[in-house]
């Protein structure tokens, strides 16, 4: 594996569900020639493995015992990120409603977090020109020495509307139900004992409620450029 160059920039982007972490991180990484890591996809991947292997995701002991078995690999090209489990493409199955409803329970298990955090740190350390890593605990736990930490927020109404927009032409989603589901997942992610969803003290908070995606991307790119100009 390559190691990071001294000039490599490490950007941590955290925030609740639907605030625009993935869309922003991918675009920022692509514009700046950085790698991109979707850590939520890794937690979803291990959850999918638990479900397909008959592990009870509500049993933290069973999840902890099985946590080391799946081999999870993330491809970090921002224009074509990949996620595989035991060599199988998991990009489709990890987005199902079943995985979404179970991922918070699996990701709350400390043994799962230890393994996935180690994997994330290895990937970040191997990104020669730098990387944008997005998730819930990147600035607080995974990469506390990141050069730039961003915490994205948005109102629950805006986030639910964005999520429903993704479903256009597929199934008519109930806005209130979407909002309730994302509030429930955020509460579980914020309330767990081990590295909960939280803003790092030194993170820049960006409220995206009234911003277009392009405005958020431009703002984050400017913040990274500022850091680079200042020699990080
Ligand atoms: N500022 C914005 N304005 C309007 N739509 C946006 C904005 N940012 C993101 N979106 C849209 O909102 C949806 C959710 O964005 P995205 O998947 O990037 O969020 P996320 O924070 O990564 O969510 P999750 O944590 O649930 O994976 C996408 O359809 C995206 O295009
Ligand atoms: N650093 C992280 C990232 C994600 N999680 C958990 O995974 C779930 C799915 O994340 P998405 O970004 O794909 O929606 C999320 O709800 C968390 O439970 C995490 O714990 N830490």
Image (spheres, rainbow, N blue to C red):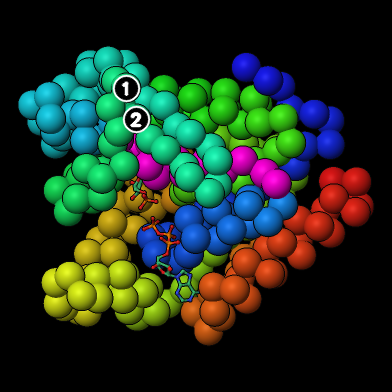
Indicate if the residue with disc 2 has its beta carbon within 8 Å of ligand 2.
no
Q: Above or below — where is 181 with respect to 168?
A: above
Tell me the tag on residue 84.
2
Image quarter for residue 72?
Answer: top left
Where is residue 166 drawn, in percent x and y? Answer: 31, 70
The residue located at (50%, 68%) in the rendering is 153
Is residue 129 visible in the rendered structure shown here? yes
- Residues 149 and 20: in front is 20
Q: Which residues are magenta?
A: 33-45
The residue located at (62%, 76%) in the rendering is 215
The residue located at (62%, 36%) in the rendering is 143
Callout 2–callout 1 Cβ contact below 8 Å? yes
Q: Above or below — where is 225 with respect to 74?
A: below
Q: Which residue is mark 1?
A: 87
Q: CA distance from mark 2 to mark 1?
A: 5 Å
Q: Spot the residue most to the bottom.
A: 210
Q: Is 189 situated left or right of 81 in this image?
A: left
Residue 39 lies within the magenta run: yes
Q: Above or below — where is 153 with respect to 196?
A: below
Instruction: For label 2, count other residues whose C-alpha is less than 10 Å away and answer few (under 14), some (14-19) or many (20+).
Output: some
**If the picture is divided into quarters, which one holds ligand 1?**
bottom left
Q: Is 17 situated left or right of 51 in this image?
A: right
Where is residue 94 drawn, in percent x and y? Answer: 26, 43
Is residue 105 visible in the rendered structure shown here? no
- Residues 209 and 35: in front is 35
Q: Above or below — where is 110 with respect to 136?
A: above
The residue located at (26%, 45%) in the rendering is 92
Q: Is 105 situated left or right of 78 in this image?
A: left
Residue 145 lies within the magenta run: no
């Amino acid at each position: 594996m390559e190691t990071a160059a001294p000039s490599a920039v490490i950007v941590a982007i955290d925030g609740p569900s639907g605030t625009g972490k993935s869309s922003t991180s991918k675009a920022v990484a692509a514009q700046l020639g950085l790698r991109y890591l979707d850590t939520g996809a890794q937690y979803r991947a291990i959850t999918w493995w638990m479900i397909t292997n008959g592990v009870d995701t509500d049993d933290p002991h069973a999840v902890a015992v099985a946590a080391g078995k799946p081999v999870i690999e993330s491809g970090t090209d921002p224009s074509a990120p990949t996620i595989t489990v035991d060599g199988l493409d998991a990009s489709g199955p990890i987005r199902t409603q079943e995985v979404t409803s179970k991922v918070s329970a699996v990701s709350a298990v400390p043994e799962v977090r230890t393994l996935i955090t180690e994997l994330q740190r290895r990937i970040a350390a191997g990104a020669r020109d730098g990387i944008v890593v997005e998730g819930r605990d990147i600035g607080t736990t995974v990469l506390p020495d990141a050069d730039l930490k961003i915490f994205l927020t948005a109102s629950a109404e805006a986030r639910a509307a964005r999520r429903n927009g993704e479903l256009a032409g597929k199934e008519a989603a109930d806005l209130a139900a979407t909002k309730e589901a994302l509030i429930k997942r955020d509460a579980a992610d914020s309330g767990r004992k081990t590295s909960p969803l939280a803003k790092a003290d030194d993170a820049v908070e960006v409220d995206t409620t009234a911003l277009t995606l392009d405005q958020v991307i431009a703002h984050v790119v400017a913040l990274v450029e500022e850091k680079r100009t200042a020699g990080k």
